[in-house]
Amino acid sequence: MTSPLRHSDPSDHSLFNHVLSALDIVVFEYDENSGTFQLQGAPPGWWTQCFGPERDASLDLHRCSPFLRDYLADPHPVWEGQSDRLEKSGPWTESDRQGGTMTLEASLLSIGSRKLVLIERLGLDFEDMRSIVQRARERMLAEDRTAKVHRTTQTRLIGQLEASERTKDDALALLQHLGITALVLDERRHVTFATDRALALLGIESSTVVGQAWERVLPFQEHDCQLVQHLLAGASHTGSGGPFCLDGARPKWVEVDIHRDPRHPDRRIIVLHDRTEVQTLRQALTEQASFYDLVGKSPAMLRVYQLVRDVAQVDTTVLIEGETGTGKELIARAIHSSSGRKHKPFIAANCAGLTDSILTSQLFGHKRGAFTGAVNDQEGLFEAAEGGTLFLDEIGDIPPNVQTALLRVLQEKEITRLGEAKPRKVNVRVVAATHHNLSEDVVRGSFRADLLYRIRIARIHLPAIRERREDIPLLAQAFLSQVCTATRKTVDRLAPETLRRLMSYPWPGNVRELRSAIEFSVISCKGNEVLPADLPPEIVESQVQASPSVVIQLVDRDEKSRLLAALSDAKGNRTEAAKRLGVSRATFYRRLVELDIHPQ
Amino acid sequence: MMQKKICMLGGFAVGKTSLVRRFVTNVFSDHYQTTIGVTVEKKCVTVDNRELTLILWDLYGEDEFQHVRESYLRGSSGYILVMDGTRRATLDTALVLQQTVVKAVGAVPFVSIINKSDLRSDWEIDEAAIEQLRERGWTVLIGSAKLGQGVEELFGRLATQMMSPSPPPGMCP
């Protein structure tokens, strides 16, 4: 070991070693002549631990790491006088003799012409720095992993989105291609998508549909709306209902299928099936079988229905002709209900059997004191029917004075109450009915010709039931249902033999008599099928005839006996007898006269 | 015995130290311990019946905290460029480092390896990128220090190239 920096003072030597010890470094000086590195001062303990005790004062580079060897072999500006700064090697790792490692760093400097190497063991500061770098790199790796996960997720989601969009496009194309009429609803039951076919059916643009509540898009009637709402709220995967009417300028009929969206249980798909054409045909069929409260699909009745539709479009007076019980009042009601007056009153008055004054008072009203018993002012039926329809049944039976007053009303559109002088304007459509042949009445002088022409502007002839026997099963079944509902009895059908008897019976009381017979049968019926024995006696006892012409020949004789039997049962009370036969009192009286029956 | 200095180069945490440890001591640790400075290891190999001592300079990883000193590269007979297949950015670092080495020591043999083949499903370096490296004249190996795959071949190929009298493919700049 050489003396430190070639100073000879022992105290300097000691001071130098203290400094080295304090700095924990080992110092070598490069000897250019020998090309060796000479140890200066006492080396610290770690140096000995790493390289062993020094055998001489020079550095044995072969015992050192190749790093230090190469480093010291390199040219160094600081030793060439080109720099007066400290030059550092950077850290390197050396193995010690105990199998451990230590990190060292060399520093080079020049003092005058002397070239020095200072080697220090990197300690806590270095470990702190290593720890910081370690954490920083671990953080970078973690962020890199996170970013990578995000990128992967993003890529996956974009892929899924693209696939989803493709699937959606395919599904939409398929939907459009198949022409399915469908709406997709979100959880709030707002429309999120509508197929072109649905838009065409509803006659609206996509932009006005999407985002709207389904009730606004599908203008169902209130009751139908509730049914569809119920279907939408249903727990089942699918539900269907209809047909429902979509209101609009051109109403549409649709059947509705409700499907759960398989991907979102709270969302719904409404598939609409346009049934407008079917419904129109169905309605046409229904109308052919029944029209308002009229039942029948015989050609004669179909002609009647068409006539009713025609006359309903105009405001003229109508004369309905037909035998008693054929349903003249029902025709009058149908005309009223089909006309523009349907929201105004429909008043029906039977003109038969009423005296001149009573009928006049009933039709035109009276002033208090106009006659005995007229204690108050009273408006007549014309005034009561203001804006609507007045049905005058049995118009052929009205007295001549009333005919005159009625004619004036029809001409002037005004009435004058009994006891008053001032006429009152009225706006009433008159529909009259009669079983008379009014033309013959005119010839006989019992009916005013001018009144006939005034009331017979339009005329409808109602066929007797015997003229439309093919309607009897339909009528019988309709009455059976009505009576069963009213009586809460369960009678499903008519036995074939029963129907055969109904078909062959002459039905002088027409539809009214048929209804009474069915009512009687239901009351008598013990099972769920009406048997012939359940029919009224006159029908049971009547012979089943194959030929209608024979029936007609038998009608008078059978009817006379029936009328007599009814009178007998009713103990001579004609009203009760008429009721039992299912005919009006007026008809009953008329038939008594026609059949030359003179009850006591 | 002939000695050859080999520098291990690459971005941080690509597995330089792990490859050296697997090669020298056949040990692998999942625990990442960043290298600060230089650690030098030695391993004797035989190439064409000639014994050769490889002096493996395991340099710290290149990143914004530490840049490779050109002085560390001086005297290198060859070098190994290490990339992490799971990080595309380490390929870019390798490209920069390769240029640095050429500038410092000239065209010496080198072999590159894309490490972490055990995580192949997570790789960001795809076949197209690998092909581009090979088109540059690089020898590109795929391996895993963790599994020991490709490690012997990595050092063996470089040793062979360094002992080869004719310029090997990996020497082109």
Image (spheres, coloured by chain):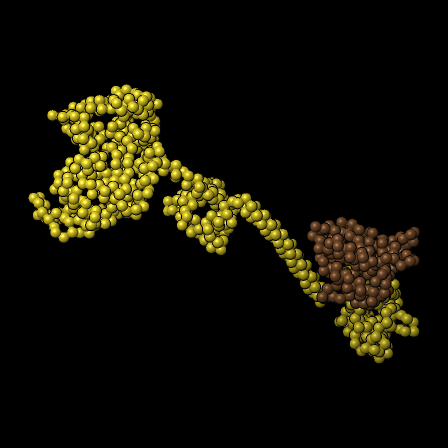
Residue A406 percent coordinates (x, y): 18, 44
Residue A496, x across and y down, in percent: 35, 23
Residue A578, quarter of picture: top left
Coordinates of residue A122 in the picture (x, y in percent): 75, 66
Which corner quadrant holds the N terminus of chain A? Answer: bottom right
Instruction: Relative to B137, say whether A380 is above or below.
Output: above
User: In this rendering, would A105 be left or right of A417?
Assistant: right
Residue A2 located left or right of residue A299? right
Residue A329: image quadrant is top left
- In the image, A171 versus A418, the foreground residue is A418
**Colour yellow belongs to chain:** A
Report whether A371 appears left or right of A149: left
Residue at 92%, 58% in the rendered image: B165
Q: Nearer the viewer, residue A112 or B10?
A: B10
Say which chain is brown: B
Q: From the image, which quarter does the C terminus of chain A lie in?
A: top left
Residue drawn where x is 81% and y is 57% of the image: B135
* A585 over B33 or under it: above or below: above
